[in-house]
Image: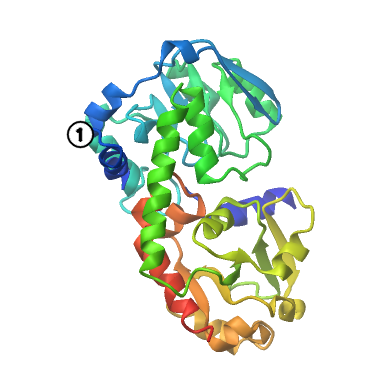
């Protein structure tokens, strides 16, 4: 069950770029050149050794890493945003616009650091799990995975290659802010990571001001499989995409909180016969296309959800960079996707009445 659920739920995951670093640098009065910003904001020697606690134990980084590898979705965006080119990271398998294994916001960040073409980092193929040999071949001195679904065996094996930073509490439950701060701390650059986070939060505030109907709405983020309408997948509050909605001013509907209970999973199922349990949801978010809303409204069970009936449904286009940018949000993907993502929720929120 866990494996099947994970495959389904993770499919929409991965997953401003150089502009993010540039904007952060501008906001703090720094240089406009990301490469220069990186050069002038390196780790201080006196912060090491750094010891981080995760679900499986402690990880100590003795000195500033010079060869940074990352595994699982999105972790590579943190060193890139901090001006560090990873030696290797997981290739994108969902929402990749051109099939090169690199999401557009990541590519832009690498481009700003002159790390594309022949200088592109190694892309790990994680189709069948973490390729330990490939990771080892990059000779990393740290492996970042603050946002991940590492098992204890994964962590133990990777730790034999290099000190490995895993998630603090829940698999796939590290939000984009903590991903930046935890990975940034491992690099000795927590203060720089915090500055980047603050800059993105400021961008969110500005974007919300232009979309006044979004803030304060209750929401449920769902996975509705057209091939199996008998079940509604509901992402729980610990899921990173749901935590992003909180940053965007929305709140989990009480029904979502009740369904989630004290689960440590990022996803729970609700039988379609109980669809009316989501009657307190202002905005229902899901993945789909231009036909999705009409399909939901024609369904005898799903149409009982008031949000579906009135059309206050935020349909995130499936399989495109916008979906991966926001389902596995990162310090680079959030500003890249912000306007388009909020436009979708503003449109749905306007129908709440």
Q: Where does the image place residue 165, in percent across and percent down from the top left?
A: 57, 26
Q: Report the residue at 38% width, 27% height from top.
A: 86
Residue 100 seen in this snapshot = no
Q: Report the residue at 46% width, 71% height from top.
A: 345
In the image shown, does 67 or 176 lie closer to the viewer? 176
Q: In this rendering, is residue 311 above or below 253?
A: below
Q: In this rendering, is residue 141 above or below 78?
A: above
Q: Is residue 191 left or right of residue 6?
A: left
Q: How many numbered marks does the figure carry?
A: 1
Q: Where does the image place residue 322, in percent across and percent down from the top left?
A: 40, 59
Disc 1 designates what residue?
A: 33
Q: Where does the image place residue 106, in percent across and percent down from the top left?
A: 34, 42
Q: Where does the image place residue 103, in percent across and percent down from the top left?
A: 36, 47
**Label 1 residue SS:** loop
Q: In this rendering, is residue 186 above or below 3?
A: above
Q: Report the residue at 54% width, 55% height from top.
A: 241
Q: Is residue 98 left or right of residue 76?
A: left
Q: Report the residue at 42% width, 44% height from top.
A: 198
Quarter of the rendering containing residue 128: top right
Q: In this rendering, is residue 209 above or below 31?
A: below
């Amino acid at each position: 069950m866990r494996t099947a659920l994970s495959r389904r739920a993770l499919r929409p995951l991965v997953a401003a770029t150089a502009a993010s670093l540039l904007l952060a640098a501008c906001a703090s009065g720094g240089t406009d050149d990301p490469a220069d910003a990186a050069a002038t904001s390196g780790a201080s020697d006196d912060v090491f050794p750094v010891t981080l606690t995760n679900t499986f134990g402690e990880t100590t980084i003795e000195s500033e890493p010079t060869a940074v590898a990352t595994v699982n979705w999105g972790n590579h965006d943190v060193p890139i945003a901090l001006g560090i080119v990873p030696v290797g990271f997981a290739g994108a398998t969902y929402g990749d616009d051109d099939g090169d294994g690199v999401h557009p916001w990541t590519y832009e960040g690498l481009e700003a650091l002159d790390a594309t073409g022949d200088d592109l980092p190694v892309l790990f193929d994680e189709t069948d799990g973490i390729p330990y040999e490939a990771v080892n071949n990059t000779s990393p001195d740290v492996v970042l995975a603050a946002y991940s679904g590492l098992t204890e065996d994964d962590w133990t094996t990777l730790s034999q290659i290099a000190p490995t930073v895993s998630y603090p509490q829940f698999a796939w439950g590290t939000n984009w802010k903590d991903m930046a701060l935890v990975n940034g701390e491992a690099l000795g650059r927590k203060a720089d990571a915090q500055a980047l986070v603050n800059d993105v939060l400021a961008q969110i505030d500005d974007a919300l001001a232009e979309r006044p109907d979004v803030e304060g709405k209750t929401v449920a983020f769902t996975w509705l499989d057209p091939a199996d309408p008998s079940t509604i997948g509901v992402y729980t509050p610990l899921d990173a995409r749901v935590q992003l909605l909180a940053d965007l001013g929305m709140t989990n509907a009480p029904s979502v909180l009740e369904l989630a209970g004290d689960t440590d999973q990022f996803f729970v199922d609700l039988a379609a016969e109980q669809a009316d349990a989501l009657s307190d949801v202002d905005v229902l978010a899901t993945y789909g296309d231009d036909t999705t809303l009409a399909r939901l409204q024609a369904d005898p069970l799903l149409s009982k959800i008031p949000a579906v009936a009135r059309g206050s449904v935020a349909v995130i286009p499936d399989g495109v960079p916008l979906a991966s940018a926001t389902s596995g949000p990162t310090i680079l993907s959030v500003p890249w996707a912000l306007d388009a993502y909020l436009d979708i929720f503003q449109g749905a929120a306007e129908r709440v009445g």
